[in-house]
Structures are given as structure tokens and as C-alpha cells.
């Protein structure tokens, strides 16, 4: 195994993590809401009066950030070695897992762990273990 040092970006990753933590903290402190993406989006599917505006703004920000990233010409562009069908299937599996786990990695991993939630610790251990196992199987056993 080799490390792609060109793609190793500890400072950008640290900055991104700090921004995610700041945004999740601000949402919780200002609204009392958890920044779990699956919960925010599912709230849009069953809207409650007076509750949709902040959810729409949050999702719009999630979509605007990658669009803004692609506008800046000097940034490193990630390469995906996967087809559209596999990408859609992966997204559906993640969505199913989020429903099954009563929350997503952002809700459990970022917000739940910071609140010392035992349920979020268990969910995050399962998410991470499944991710490690999937990468091992795909990269070393299947050979993709």
C-alpha cells in the first residue's frame, strides 16, 4: 500500500473539520437542533409549519458548497473511479443505513459523540467498522 501524498491535505482537513464543528455547534446553540443530515432532510419530507425554512437553508448550503468549490480553478479535483450506477446504489445503501441506525454519521459521529451519547458511540463504531470492512473487501479481496 502506498500513500498518495499529493492528496494528503492535513491543514485543509483540519480547517474543514473545524468549520463542521463550528456549524454544528452554532446550529445547536442557536436553534437547539442537531446537525444530522438525514434528520434535517427527512424533516423536509414531512414538513411542520414554521420548521421548513431553516431546513431548506441548511440543505441549500450543503448543495452550494460543492458548487462554489468547483468554481475556484486552482483547487485539486477529486477523481472518482466508480460509475454513476454504483454511486447511486451506494447513496441508497447509506440512506437505508441511516434510517436503520436512527441517524446518519453526521448526527451520530459529529453531534452525538460530542454530547457523549452512548447510542451515538455504538452507531459510530458500527458505521466505521462497516466502512473499514467494505474498503478491505473491495480493495483486497474483490480487487476493484
Image: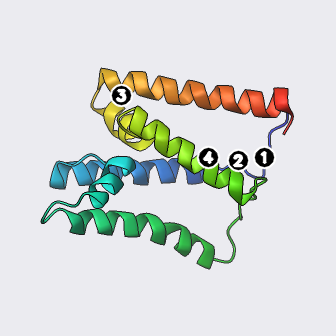
Proximity of marks 3 and 4: CB atoms separated by less than 8 Å:
no
Label 2: state its secondary structure: loop
Front of the two marks 3 and 4: 4
Q: Are marks 1 and 4 in contact (CB under 8 Å)?
A: no
Query: Which numbered marker is on residue 5?
Result: 1
Quadrant placement of the N terminus? top right
Residue 98 to residue 35: above or below: above
- 3 or 4: tag closer to the N-terminus: 4
Disc 4 is placed on an element classified as helix
Front in this rendered view, residue 109 or 138: 138
- Helix, strand or loop at label 3? It is helix
* Residue 120 marker: 3
User: Gap between marks 2 and 4, in whole Å?
Assistant: 24 Å
Query: Do the CB atoms of the residues marked 2 and 1 lie less than 8 Å apart?
Result: yes
Q: Which class describes the residues within 10 Å of circle 2: few (<14), some (14-19), or many (20+)?
A: few
The correct choice, above or below, for 135 with respect to 58 in the image is above
Amino acid at each position: 500500500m502506498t500513500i498518495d501524498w499529493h492528496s494528503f491535505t492535513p491543514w485543509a482537513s483540519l480547517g474543514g473539520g473545524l468549520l463542521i464543528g463550528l456549524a454544528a455547534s452554532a446550529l445547536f446553540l442557536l436553534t437547539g437542533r442537531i446537525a444530522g443530515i438525514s434528520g434535517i432532510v427527512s424533516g423536509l419530507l414531512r414538513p411542520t409549519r414554521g420548521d421548513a425554512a431553516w431546513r431548506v437553508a441548511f440543505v441549500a448550503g450543503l448543495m452550494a458548497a460543492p458548487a462554489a468549490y468547483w468554481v475556484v480553478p486552482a483547487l485539486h479535483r477529486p477523481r472518482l473511479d466508480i460509475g454513476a450506477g454504483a454511486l447511486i446504489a451506494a447513496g441508497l445503501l447509506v440512506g437505508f443505513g441511516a434510517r436503520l441506525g436512527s441517524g446518519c454519521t453526521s448526527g451520530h459521529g459529529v453531534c452525538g459523540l460530542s454530547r457523549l451519547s452512548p447510542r451515538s458511540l455504538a452507531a459510530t463504531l458500527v458505521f466505521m467498522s462497516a466502512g473499514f470492512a467494505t474498503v478491505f473487501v473491495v480493495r483486497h479481496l474483490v480487487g476493484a
